[in-house]
Image (cartoon, rainbow, N blue to C red):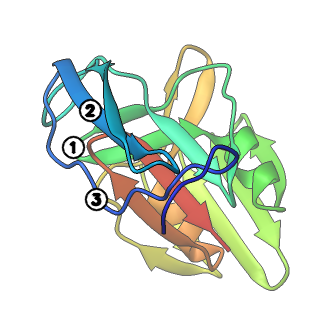
Amino acid sequence: MAGTADFAAEFDKELKALTPGKYYYKAFATNKGGVSYGKVKEFNITGPAGEPKAGDAIRVVLDGQMLQFDVPPVIENDRTLVPLRVIFEALGADVEWNGETQTVTAKRSDTEIKLIIGGEAYVNGQAVELDVPAKIIEDRTLVPLRFVSEALGCQVDWDGVTRTVSISG
């Protein structure tokens, strides 16, 4: 498609695997008289190249909406842990906390999830083995995000380059 004074032409090339630094491109246009001209533009790529560093923030997006947490998500043994109340409520589950037994119970429709701090997990009464159990960090209970989301019927994807967890469903 050719561009006009009112509409830019579409660009059909994708730039991949750029590392941080300065880049240049030259845009060409041809006027009605057949004269072509070009202008050099520059742009910068910033941020980490390749895999992110351990200290970079983890983002959690649920159905296109970024979730906000009062305690940031953490990664432990390749598992993302997030504050329980935010994730359960965002997924439409009712949450109960029992301080005596240090147990979280979340219910949505016909699914019940029970997590014991530092220990077991159950879905509808059936024991589930977790790589990383729920834990308390900075006075907040953090739960394994993928386990919780998938137990409630959601799809979970991880983008290691942007350190973003995307949940749909």
Q: Secondary structure at mark 3?
A: loop
Mark 3 crowd level (few <14, some 14–19, many ≥20, 10 Å Cα): few
Which residue in the structure is indicated by mark 2? 26
Kindly identify which numbered label has been placed on residue 106. none
Q: Residue at x 32, y 31 (%)?
A: 38
Q: How many marks?
A: 3
Of all residues shown, which one is farthest toward the front?
33
Cα separation between marks 2 and 3: 14 Å
Mark 1 crowd level (few <14, some 14–19, many ≥20, 10 Å Cα): few
- 89 sits left or right of 122 in the view: right
Foreground tag (3 vs 1):
3
Q: Residue at x 34, y 34 (%)?
A: 37
Which residue in the structure is indicated by mark 3? 13
The vertical placement of 21 against 68, above or below, is above
Foreground tag (2 vs 3):
2
Which callout, 3 or 1, points at the residue further toward the start of the chain? 3
- 159 sits left or right of 68 in the view: left
Q: Residue at x 13, y 29 (%)?
A: 19
Amino acid under disc 1: Asn
Report x, y in % for residue 48: 21, 23
Q: Nearer the viewer, residue 169 or 130?
A: 169
Amino acid under disc 2: Lys
Q: Quadrant of residue 167?
A: bottom right
Q: Nearer the viewer, residue 25 or 159?
A: 25
Q: Secondary structure at mark 1?
A: loop
Which residue in the structure is indicated by mark 1? 77
Q: Secondary structure at mark 2?
A: strand
Cα separation between marks 3 and 1: 38 Å
Q: Quadrant of residue 163?
A: top left
